[in-house]
Image (cartoon, coloured by chain):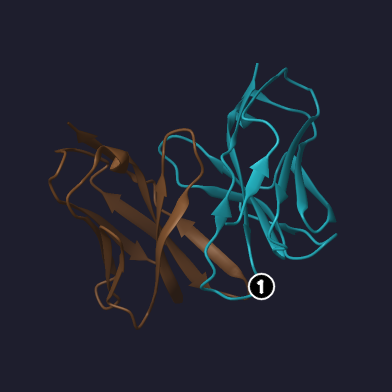
Chain colours: A brown, B cyan
Amino acid sequence: KNQVEQSPQSLIILEGKNCTLQCNYTVSPFSNLRWYKQDTGRGPVSLTIMTFSENTKSNGRYTATLDADTKQSSLHITASQLSDSASYICVVSVYTGFQKLVFGTGTRLLVSP
Amino acid sequence: DVKVTQSSRYLVKRTGEKVFLECVQDMDHENMFWYRQDPGLGLRLIYFSYDVKMKEKGDIPEGYSVSREKKERFSLILESASTNQTSMYLCASTAGQSYNSPLHFGNGTRLTVT
């Protein structure tokens, strides 16, 4: 069964600190892995998309890593800001006849002043 | 920037009513999607469309239908609303057939069925 699991479910960090969110998946056949940021009351916004051959991808203070062998990904946030408070959703694309996406349930991050 | 606009942010409907959720995108994207988002669950695909007048069932199509008469507009229809359809509904679009195209989401419609 295709599944995406994220940890932790929620996290509180102090402004300025770094944090790392985890994503484990059991999806086959794998096409790509995405991270989305969802602010409260808003739709998700794409942060990164990584294919099988990419190990690391950055978007500003966000750096995603992918280990296709262990089927794990992480999202590292550097020097957190209050605006980073949001849910972060890991999504894995299944290589079928059409783009099928399997969504994790997200990690809710709160950055405290 | 791609803009996906959902016509209502909040809706309250009664059980048995027919409900229309509208979504418009301004980037000429071929593909459009309707998801629902519930606490503790990942986004679940209801229906998608890869062309005008084309539609495909997603993972949870029961109780829903869709309409795509124009490329930019994708409507979700609840034929007879029920309380278990209370949820956040998200519309999304993406270009072409590339597996690496990001989804662009609207800001959602929070539907409450009483």
Q: Is residue B54 left or right of residue A25?
A: right
* Residue B53, percent from left and from top: 85, 59
Which residue occupies 27% across, 77% down? A55
Which residue occupies 65% across, 55% down? B58
Which residue appears farthest toward the front when viewing the image?
B1
Q: Is residue A42 left or right of residue B28?
A: left
The foreground one among A69 and A53 is A53
Disc 1 marks which residue? B96
* Residue B40, percent from left and from top: 40, 38
* Residue B89, percent from left and from top: 60, 38
Which residue occupies 48% across, 33% down? A41
Which residue occupies 33% across, 79% down? A54
Q: Quadrant of residue B51?
A: bottom right
Dot 1 amino acid type: Gly
Please identify the quadrant where the C terminus of chain B is shown.
top right
Q: Quadrant of residue B110?
A: top right
